[in-house]
Image: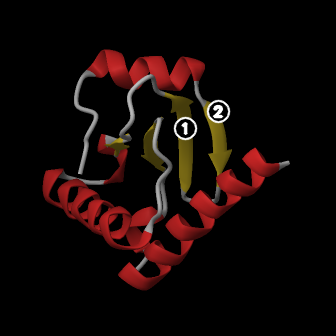
Amino acid sequence: MHRLKKNKEFNYIYKKGERVSTEHFTLFVVKSKYENYKIGFSVSKKLGKANKRNKLKRRLKEIVRKDIKVLPFRNYVLLAREGVQELDFILLKEEIIFLFKKYEKKKVI
């Protein structure tokens, strides 16, 4: 998986990217000049201690790796909101899939 790691990459996507939201997540997307995609995960300290935040990020990475068909030439940031810690894996997966489909529908229109 191609990951965003640098703070300036995240900030650029927050400023320039398109935004799609659900109750527990916001997805920022910006076009990239490279052929592959990059994705970053943002989980605030408000959502819990490090072990809970890391568990959530591991789950999100696995969902994106297995179930999401990401578009090339795009960079993504997936921002978790409060309340996401109560979701189990299946509900988490359904909401992430819905979020990416919502973005694709937005781009078609």
Residue 38: percent from the left, percent from the top? 34, 39
Residue at image location 50% in from the left, 49% down from the top: 71
Q: Secondary structure at mark 1?
A: strand
Between 61 and 24, the one lying in front of the other is 61
Q: Which mark is residue 5?
A: none
- Given the image, on which type of amino acid does mark 2 rest? Glu
State yes or no: discs 2 and 1 in contact (Cβ < 8 Å): yes
User: What whole-number distance in Å separates the C-alpha atoms at marks 2 and 1?
Assistant: 5 Å
Q: Residue furthest right?
A: 109
Q: Is residue 67 above or below residue 60?
A: below
Which residue bears the numbered disc 1?
Answer: 28
Residue 59: percent from the left, percent from the top? 28, 67
Residue at image location 47% in from the left, 54% down from the top: 70
Residue 22 in the figure: left or right of residue 85 = right
Local packing at callout 2 (Cα closer than 10 Å; few below 14, some 14-19, many 20+) is some
Q: Is residue 107 above or below residue 13?
A: below
Local packing at callout 1 (Cα closer than 10 Å; few below 14, some 14-19, many 20+) is many
Q: Disc 2 or 1, which lies upstream in sequence?
A: 2
Residue 3: percent from the left, percent from the top? 25, 41
Between 42 and 13, the one lying in front of the other is 13
Which residue bears the numbered disc 2?
Answer: 18
- Given the image, on which type of amino acid does mark 1 rest? Phe
Q: Secondary structure at mark 2?
A: strand
Residue 70 in the figure: left or right of residue 38 = right
